[in-house]
Image (cartoon, helix red, strand yellow):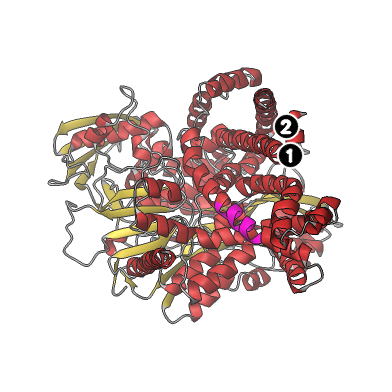
Amino acid sequence: MLVFVVRRLAFLALTLLGMSVVLFVITRLIPADPARIAAGEYATREMIQSARLELGLDRSLPEQYWVYLKAVTRGDLGRSVQSRRPVLADLSTHFPATLELSLFSLVLSTLVAIPLGVVAATRRGGKVDHSSRVTALLGISLPIFWLGLMLQLVFYKHLSWFPYGGRLSSGLDAPPAVTGLYLIDSLIAMRGLVFVDALWHLVMPGLAMSGITIAVLSRMTRASMLDVLRREYVRVARAKGLPERRVIYRHALRNAALPIVTVLGIQFGILLTGAVLTETVFSWPGIGRLAFKAIEALDYPVLMGFALLVTFVFSLINLLMDVCYGLLDPRIATR
Amino acid sequence: MRRGIARVVLGSLLAVLLAGVAAAGDKNTLNVGFYIEPTSLDAHVVTSTDVYIIWNMYEPLVALQRDTVKFEPKLATSWEISPDQKTYTFKLRKGVKFHDGTPFTAAAVKASIERIIQFKRGSSWLLTSVKEVKVVDDGTAQIVLSKPDIAFQRGLPFIYMMSPAAIKAHEEAPGDMAPNWFMDKSAGTGPYKIESWARGDKLTMVKFDDYWGGWNKPHVTKVIYHAVLEPGTQRLMVEKGDMDLPLIYTADDIEAYRKNPNIVVDSKPGTELMYIRMHNQAGPTKDKRVRQALSLAFDWKTFGTVMRGNIAPSDGPAPRELLGDWRPQRVLREYNIDRAKKLLAEAGFPNGFKMSYVYNKGDEEKRVMGEVWQSGLQKLGVSLDINVMTWPTLVERLSGWGDKRTEANAENSYGQYTNARIPDAYSFLYFMYHSGASKGAGRNFMFYGNPRVDDLISRAASAPPEERTKLYREASQIIVDDTPDIFVDKIPDNNIRRKVVEGYYHDPLASRSFHFYDMYKTGP
């Protein structure tokens, strides 16, 4: 297992390297001059030239890449062309927000989707099965954007149950950053009010984001469970006279878990990187909005940093999934 | 036990709900929606709409009088310009403190101007002719120019004073003038200072207790900018009373706001102009008659309807406010296909041609403008190919033409907004029409060039005020006759605010801008 993990980590480093080359070339191929953007609209030729020198854009492409790579290995991702803030600082303030929201949404989805899928499979053709199909259809087809606005309309405007968005109410200070996740940091700092407030702010964006995950996950659980429930060991378990709950949750679900974990992993990756819409509607200071802003302004260093982070996160999730497979099915680990 | 936990959680939730309600209902706090969230709040780096935020924290020597384009004293109580227009002497206001508690003196003028010049960003284009800043004594500063310069003279309201002590204290390397610290902290003399800025979420500014102007009249004491960048959400917040001043809205939102008795929609024509610009040196539009014909194919009425009347007629190349309330004659605002056909035939294009129009992503009005034009052009046999690109790509594509100058390389037309960057027609006439503004500085992206116009604008830049206006008017009239652009309209400055907000006034130069010190709320 250890060898496996180490090998995968080495492979991850290679993936990142390859990715950085591709990204670097692509961002430089766009026919626009970042120096001009950095210098501002009314910049004189002198101002543009000085920005070009400052950004190192006067050097050749391989040279620029080499400089960049050397800096990255030191943990320096460069500075934003727009704000001139270190990219790492931008990423480390925005990424935890997205991570917290994605984790919350993933937990929420799992809590809803897996029981839903299990019940739909065990009572195939029943009321729950049919309504789960409708739920899945809605979840996958309702645009997040629309769903978000509807949630705001009902639960913020009319019922006043939840805030419009953001991570904390005005007047509350963020807890001292340890993990960057407000739920955890507030507990560390023993600030109950901040914890509740952060949780309160998570509910609506979390719900809006969960639709697709719930849809995919519940369908996958159902299909996988149906497959497993037909197996002979399930019949044996039943024949032994085990209670039905035990048969389903211990024997069937555990064996049906592999494809579910796969879907969970992929969905988590998508949640982490594809939250731009949710983040926009709910004013969530996450990484999706940061990237979107960087694209509009051709902020190369931020884009590179974002893409490298995404590559890293996706690879890491894949690795974790593989480890999970091993835990769930010992045959995979020993292979 | 379980019930106990539930009770605690529910109790906290209730407390949060009540706290939320209390924050929203604060009479002294103004809640504003961002138009665009700034990337930095350094007064010497920001450009464009970000300036309208920082001018509540930093002040210039000379400012614009409320609601006009005239100057009034701010941090300078009086000033004198030498007859050769190269030496400016400022008598400075006494008893002014920076946010860090240090007094404002002539040394701050020197440090601020040098910092702007060193950074080569933001408003440094206004200072290209500054030769020297002299500290005559604590209360007197003198700025010496290498030549008379209109950009400096009229740009003075955008040169903000910063505490030299704070600059020194927060340098990371000797002489770097603290570029990082000032990104999200303030050390100006203005009425508000930054309390906190959680990027992507909220920017909070609070009153500066020692502000020299005092706090005796009604003023808001706290301003919160919310990074809510979705018009629908801003509207929900306004309707609920959680936001007082929304800055992003669609045409639908404006209609809804107008019908809401608790909200005021206050539209005034701004000085921001909208143009369709046609290439002056490549393609069929090289010919003035073609440009005139294409102008006649723009259906103003339809455009007005599509924009729901939310536009005002353009004054031509520059807004009338900056030309002494004057507009050139014969600004084409006519939709006349027959005349257009005649002109096209005269120019040798009786059967029309193909041409391109580009606009930048995000500015939907420019797409609409292109589509309205497209349907008119069809009647002339001219097929208009509309393309969208990001703003930086568009700038590169258009200004890059100057390097190659081939027909194939040219875009034939594009949509453009321009606002008054300084309170002077120079910011339109030079940056849009002077041949020197087609590369680097400026937006003469369609390579209009008329030596007579160049000469008039250059002369105006060093002429005394009345003479200057005369030269500007002459240049404007020639430009209108040359028809490099379709002068589409003036973008109105829509101020949408909750009725409880008082003290707002339109800034003639800056749409969507606020001077918070003058504002207050009559209720929560």
Query: Is B420 above or below relative to A55?
Result: below
B350 and B241: which one is in front? B241
Task: Specify whether residue B462 is in view.
Answer: no
A74 and B89: which one is in front? A74
Magenta part, dominant SS: helix
Task: Specify whether residue A51 is in view.
Answer: yes
**Residue to which mark 1 is pinned:** A329
Label 2 close to label 1 by CB (< 8 Å): yes
**Residue to which mark 2 is pinned:** A333
* Residue B446 image position (x, y, % from top left): 64, 44
* Residue A156 image position (x, y, % from top left): 49, 70
Asked if residue A234 lies left or right of residue B227, the reply is right
Asked if residue A28 lies left or right of residue A70, the reply is right
Chain for disc number 2: A
Residues shaded magenta: A104-113
Could you tell me which residue is drawn at 22 percent across and 33 percent down?
A: B165
Which of the 4 image quarters holds residue A221? Answer: bottom right
Three-letter amino acid code of the residue under disc 2 = Ala
Query: Is B82 above or below relative to B212?
Result: above
* Residue B295 image position (x, y, % from top left): 69, 60
Asked if residue B367 lies left or right of residue A230, the reply is left
Quadrant of the frame with the N terminus of chain B: bottom left
Whether B337 is among the magenta residues is no
B360 and A42: which one is in front? B360
